[in-house]
Amino acid sequence: MVLPDKAIDRVALYFRALSDPMRLRILNSLRESDRSVGELAEIAECSQANVSKHLRVLSDAGIVSRTARGTTILIGIADPTIFDLCALVCDSVARGLEKDFALHKALKNAKRT
């Protein structure tokens, strides 16, 4: 598939939003339910200001959404297919780790002989 430059820019924005470990932790904590910024800060063990900064990036990419419930703003997943993408990446990383482990084991056995 050939993508126009504007589409490529949008895809890059999406992947850039996923390129930070803290943002991945935030997404992982949203798997179970919507959460407030305070809850996310507590789970991620960082300040609310830091969480808000990361949420802005995720929101700009269309990955998370905000919903008002009374005086509380809840953050939720706007695009549930994000977890399908994460599963693909995790599977790929796992295969790579299995290869690394097999190589490590082979090298360790070769040193013994």
Image (spheres, rainbow, N blue to C red):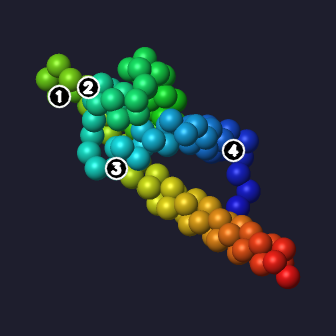
Residue in the picture at 81% in, 78% down: 112
Q: Contact (CB < 8 A) between labels 3 and 2?
A: no
Q: Earlier in the sequence, mark 3 or mark 1?
A: 3
Disc sitting over residue 69 in the figure: 1
Badge 1 amino acid: Arg
> Quick check: 82 above or below 27?
below
How far, Cα to Cα, is label 3 from label 1?
19 Å
Q: Earlier in the sequence, mark 3 or mark 2?
A: 3
Residue 38 in percent (x, y) is at 30, 25
Does residue 44 appear to the left or right of 69 in the view shown? right
How far, Cα to Cα, is label 3 from label 2?
17 Å
99 or 74, nearer to the observer? 99
Badge 2 amino acid: Ile
Which residue does the numbered mark 2 point to in the structure image? 73
> Quick check: 84 above or below 51?
below
Which residue does the numbered mark 3 point to in the structure image? 31
Disc sitting over residue 86 in the figure: none
Badge 4 amino acid: Ile
Which label lies toward us, 1 or 4? 1
Q: Earlier in the sequence, mark 1 or mark 4?
A: 4
Which residue does the numbered mark 4 point to in the structure image? 8
SS for tag 3?
A: loop
> Quick check: 4 above or below 103?
above
